[in-house]
């Protein structure tokens, strides 16, 4: 089989941080590479990566945009939520804590608001809300949150927008922010030591102020760098302001400025995209070329130049590739090519270029994205190389698919797990739940011959196996197997039984066979033969009548005999008044029912004749009839025919006996108007006229009367009329169906049967809720013809109810097998809310509680992490029976800082809560100590390491005090930075 190669994605966005990078694929998956000391790559670790690794996305979420500036990242999810990860010492993740996160966590946005655009700065973040307001969070020493204060915040706070203005885009730099207003103006706030706010001053601003744009120019795009800013004007030119020590403003000087200046103009080129880095700038021109200027110490400008280059120079893009988007990091650059690949250049000491090396590059080259499928398992069993049975390595087809041969396995669905590497690094395997089903060709047993008596039922049974379960059909042959026709009546719901009701002698010799079919093939059983024996009946016989004829005439004696098997009729004669009897064979008809005596003589007169009918069930002898031979003429006599009742399509016979001298001629008539008129009948009259045979009578013939007339020279005599009654062929009812029904709660279910029989059967329904022990009538939902039972809006309580139908007519009654109604619940994936952070005193108990929903009811499990969420271990002690509460007894100071989270799981999926933190305070203490004492401790620790004079680390230290996180939070952030 073939498996699709895991996506090495087409890149749609790039974002460069201090020494790390993010790329966003067209599938919503995000990848990181470079330094990872604070978890800014989002892969759940703090391990540096020199090739892309996948960011651990929240379950069911894909990202639509990403932003990485220094050491933390933001992303907007397709669920409308905002996520953050990486460094958090100043609360820049917006999760109301200062703990770093190595995987994306949800930002605590204001109620009813979703962020539509996000930007990351140095230890702070900015976002535009769906309510038209702008929000910021994190460090605020220079007013970079724009809320008219210098107090940092670990959750989003509202930026103080100019009256009547909403921002349409934002950019965050080292310690200042830029925005475009819907009034056409650009605004800036935060640090302004190098004039990066562009308001003509070097004064920090805690609220947005107007950027002093050149006369007649409005800015269409702004980008904040490390203490400098760039903008594109509506004239297509690039303007810059702020620090220009490295030529990053591109105006051919190294002079800093607190008001926008125009970058050096390239003849005929207007700029469409800009990006600011640590001390360099990158831009895309409308000529399709990419340009860069500023510091080039590590080759971050993408071309060979002196270390600082103060005017735009062309980036050496790969042949045939044009860049469509750019991003500038501290000392490296990223771009997206029109081939869908990511490109990188500049500093690579910690893998920020993502090419699998630590070598700097002065020209762009593709970010590594080699995908190799290393193995495929089927239900835990390795697949086999199609070309080498001794290898489990899949074969690369070169078209984005890999071939693997399935191993031997029992039938049934199995998970398919695809193991793969990206750039030589093992990735999370891709699991296709029930991704492959091992199948088995059908097998079938042979039905056995059946011998039954006429009118009984016959059953042919087979057993079939296979995966998927085979469909079983039946065929019959009435020509010894030369040809076969399908049989559907009498086949059970599972097809394994063929039931034939009220078989007839005409069915005898018919052969039946079954065919089992599934997707893997078809197999036909041997044929079984039906033998139908007649119902055995002892013989009966009617009496012959006396005959008087003239000498030389013929005399005929007749009887009727019945019995099963058909009796043999023999005749005897007695010339001594019945004392002795001798067999008679001359003149006996083939069926034995008629004895014809030709040219009788006077000596025959007085002889008696009788008939005996014999079969396996017995023997019966008729009364004797006497032959009289007369010389004198005699008027004719005739016996009356008797009424005959037959079934539609059968043959009816009317018989008379006639005598007279001379022998009379017998003719027949019929009447269809109850004897009012009569018409002659000649068809079917025997040669001697004594029998009228009517073949293939129909229901329309019923009620017709027949009579015979005997005529000779002495007169004529007519018999009484006998009536023909033709009954329809009565057939006992048969029933097929119903079949089991499986529906979802609230839906309708229909049970249907097919019935036959004559007269047409009446169909009734019953239901059983106790497995068929008791049955109650069902009338609601039964169709007019009784063939369908419709159940509306079924509930879970109806599941397991059995239904059966009964067909009844004059010939009997038959009840179907029971069909079962299965009602599946409406399946709902689990949701989880809670838990919340808990703060308790040493020795007390702490309870974490969640609320979950889902169908089926989810199972809730708990985990704990003592290393800030890097590793999680299961927690079982203290978990309530329903799993909703985790109770921790007698907590200690050593438990403080432990994180807990819960996972709700059912058949529809799994969801994990956000982690929450347990804080344990000392008994009798104030839980925080004197902030001044803690600040002294921070200072001492920094002094020991020689970092006390570092502005960056003083930011972290002061942040700890301002945020009220106490020494514990502040020192943890500082130590993390020192260690990494």
Image (tube, rainbow, N blue to C red):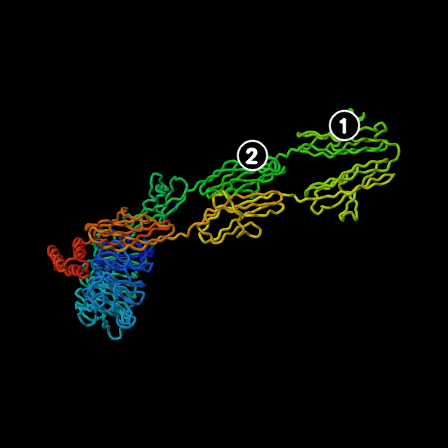
Residue 656 sits in quarter: top right
Q: In the rendered image, which quarter is residue 937 located in?
A: bottom left
For numbered disc 1, what is the local secondary structure?
strand
- Most extreme residue toward the bottom is 215
The x and y percentages for residue 420 are 31, 47
Q: Is residue 862 left or right of residue 614?
A: left
Q: Are there few (<14), some (14-19), or many (20+) residues within 10 Å of tag 1?
A: some
How many C-alpha atoms fall within 10 Å of the one at disc 2: few (<14), some, or many (≥20)?
some
User: Can you give x and y, in whole percent of width and height, for residue 53 in the image?
Assistant: 27, 52
Q: Is residue 353 visible?
A: no
The residue most toward the right is: 632
Q: Is residue 398 left or right of residue 610?
A: left
| Residue for badge 1 | 572
Lower sequence index among marks 2 and 1: 2
Residue 584 in the image: state x and y as whole percent.
Answer: 77, 27
Tell me where residue 526 appears, x and y as whole percent.
53, 36
Q: In the rendered view, tell whether residue 956 sits above or below residue 215.
A: above
Secondary structure of the residue carrying numbered label 2: loop
Q: Is residue 856 left or right of residue 733?
A: left
Closer to us: mark 2 or mark 1?
1
The quarter of the image holding the N terminus is: top left
Observer-nearest residue: 307 or 213? 213
Whole-Å distance between the Cαs marked 2 and 1? 44 Å
Q: Which residue is mark 2?
A: 449
The answer to which of 768 and 639 lies nearer the viewer is 768
- State yes or no: discs 2 and 1 in contact (Cβ < 8 Å): no
Residue 166, above or below 453: below
Count of numbered labels shown in the rendering:
2
Query: Looking at this view, is 338 or 470 the one in front?
Result: 470
Q: Is residue 927 visible?
A: yes
Q: Which mark is residue 786?
A: none
């Amino acid at each position: 089989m073939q498996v699709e190669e895991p996506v090495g994605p087409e890149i749609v966005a790039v974002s460069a941080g201090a020494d790390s990078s993010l790329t966003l694929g067209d599938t919503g998956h995000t990848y990181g590479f470079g330094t990872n000391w604070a978890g800014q790559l989002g892969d759940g670790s703090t391990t540096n990566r020199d090739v892309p690794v996948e960011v651990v996305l929240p379950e069911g979420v894909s990202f639509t945009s990403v932003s990485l500036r220094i050491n933390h990242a933001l992303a907007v999810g397709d669920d409308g939520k905002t996520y953050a990860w990486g460094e958090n010492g100043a609360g820049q993740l917006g999760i109301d804590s200062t703990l770093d996160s190595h995987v994306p966590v949800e930002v605590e946005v204001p109620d009813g608001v979703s962020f539509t655009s996000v930007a990351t700065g140095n230890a702070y973040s900015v976002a535009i809300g769906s309510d038209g307001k702008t929000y910021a969070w994190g460090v605020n020493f220079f007013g970079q949150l724009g809320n008219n204060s210098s107090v940092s915040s670990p959750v989003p706070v509202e930026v103080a927008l100019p009256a009547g203005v909403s921002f349409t885009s934002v950019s965050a730099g080292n310690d200042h922010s830029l925005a475009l207003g819907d009034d056409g103006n650009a605004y800036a706030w935060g640090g302004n030591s190098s004039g990066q706010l562009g308001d003509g001053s070097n004064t920090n601003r805690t609220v947005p102020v107007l950027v002093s744009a050149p006369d007649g120019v409005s800015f269409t795009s702004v980008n904040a760098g490390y203490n400098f800013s760039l903008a594109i004007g509506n004239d297509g030119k690039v303007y810059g302001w702020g620090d220009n020590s490295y030529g990053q403003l591109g105006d051919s000087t190294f002079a800093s400025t607190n008001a926008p200046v125009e970058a050096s103009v390239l003849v005929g080129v207007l700029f469409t995209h800009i990006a600011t880095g640590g001390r360099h700038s990158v831009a895309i021109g409308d000529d399709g070329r990419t340009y860069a200027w500023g510091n080039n110490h590590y080759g971050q400008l993408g071309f060979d130049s002196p270390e600082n280059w103060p005017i735009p120079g062309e980036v050496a893009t790969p042949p045939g590739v044009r860049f469509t988007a750019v991003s500038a990091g501290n000392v490296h650059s990223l771009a997206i090519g029109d081939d869908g690949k990511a490109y990188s250049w500049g500093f690579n000491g910690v893998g920020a270029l993502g090419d699998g090396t630590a070598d700097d590059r002065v020209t762009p080259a593709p970010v590594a994205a080699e995908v190799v499928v290393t193995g495929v398992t089927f239900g835990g069993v390795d697949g086999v190389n199609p070309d080498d049975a001794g290898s489990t390595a899949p074969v690369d087809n070169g078209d984005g698919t890999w071939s693997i041969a399935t191993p031997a396995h029992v039938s049934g669905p199995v998970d398919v797990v695809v193991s793969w590497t990206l750039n030589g690094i093992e990735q999370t395997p891709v699991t296709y739940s029930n991704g492959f089903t091992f199948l088995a060709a059908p097998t079938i047993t042979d039905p056995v011959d059946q011998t039954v008596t006429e009118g009984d039922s016959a059953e042919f049974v087979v057993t079939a196996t296979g995966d998927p379960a085979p469909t079983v059909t039946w065929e019959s042959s009435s020509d010894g197997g030369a040809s076969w026709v399908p049989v559907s009546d009498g086949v059970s719901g599972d097809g394994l039984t063929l039931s034939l009701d009220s078989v007839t002698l005409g069915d005898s010799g018919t052969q039946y066979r079954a065919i089992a079919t599934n997707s893997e093939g078809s197999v036909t059983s041997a044929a079984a033969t039906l033998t139908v024996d007649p119902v055995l009946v002892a013989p009966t016989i009617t009496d012959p009548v006396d005959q008087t004829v003239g000498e030389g005439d013929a005399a005929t004696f007749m009887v009727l005999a019945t019995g099963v098997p058909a009796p043999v009729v023999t005749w005897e004669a007695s010339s001594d008044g019945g004392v002795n009897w001798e067999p008679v064979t001359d003149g006996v008809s083939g069926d034995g029912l008629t004895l014809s005596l030709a040219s009788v003589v006077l000596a025959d007169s007085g002889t008696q004749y009788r008939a005996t009918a014999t079969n396996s069930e017995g023997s019966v002898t008729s009364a004797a009839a006497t032959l009289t031979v007369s010389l004198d003429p005699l008027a004719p006599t005739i016996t009356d025919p008797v009424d005959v009742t037959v079934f539609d399509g059968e043959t009816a016979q009317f018989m008379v006996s006639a005598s007279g001298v001379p022998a009379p001629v017998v003719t027949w008539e019929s009447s269809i108007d109850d004897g009012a008129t009569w018409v002659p009948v000649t068809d079917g009259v025997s040669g001697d006229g004594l029998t009228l045979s009517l073949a293939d009578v129909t229901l329309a013939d019923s009620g017709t009367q027949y009579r015979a007339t005997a005529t000779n020279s002495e007169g004529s005599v007519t018999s009484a009329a006998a009536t023909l009654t033709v009954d329809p062929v009565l057939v006992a009812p048969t029933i097929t169906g119903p079949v089991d029904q499986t529906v979802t709660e609230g839906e309708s279910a229909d049970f249907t049967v097919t019935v036959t029989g004559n007269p047409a059967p009446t169909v009734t329904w019953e239901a059983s809720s106790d497995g068929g022990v008791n049955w109650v009538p069902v009338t609601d939902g039964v169709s007019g013809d009784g063939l369908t039972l419709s159940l509306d809006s079924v509930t879970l309580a109806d599941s397991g109810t059995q239904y059966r139908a009964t067909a009844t007519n004059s010939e009997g009654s038959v009840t179907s097998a029971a069909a079962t109604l299965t009602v599946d619940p409406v399946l709902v994936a689990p949701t989880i809310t809670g838990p919340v952070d808990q703060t308790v005193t040493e020795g007390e108990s702490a309870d974490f509680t969640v609320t979950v929903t889902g169908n089926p009811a989810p199972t809730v499990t708990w985990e704990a992490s003592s290393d800030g969420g890097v590793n999680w271990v299961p927690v079982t002690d203290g978990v309530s029976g329903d799993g909703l509460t985790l109770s921790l007894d007698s907590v200690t100071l050593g438990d403080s800082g432990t994180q807990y989270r819960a996972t709700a799981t059912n058949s529809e999926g799994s969801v994990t809560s956000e982690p929450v933190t347990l804080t344990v305070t000392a008994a009798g203490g104030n839980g925080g100590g004197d902030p001044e004492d803690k600040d002294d401790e921070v200072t001492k620790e920094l002094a020991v390491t020689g970092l006390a004079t570092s502005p960056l680390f003083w930011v972290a230290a002061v942040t700890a005090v301002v945020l009220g996180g106490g020494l514990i939070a502040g020192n943890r952030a500082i130590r993390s930075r020192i260690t990494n």
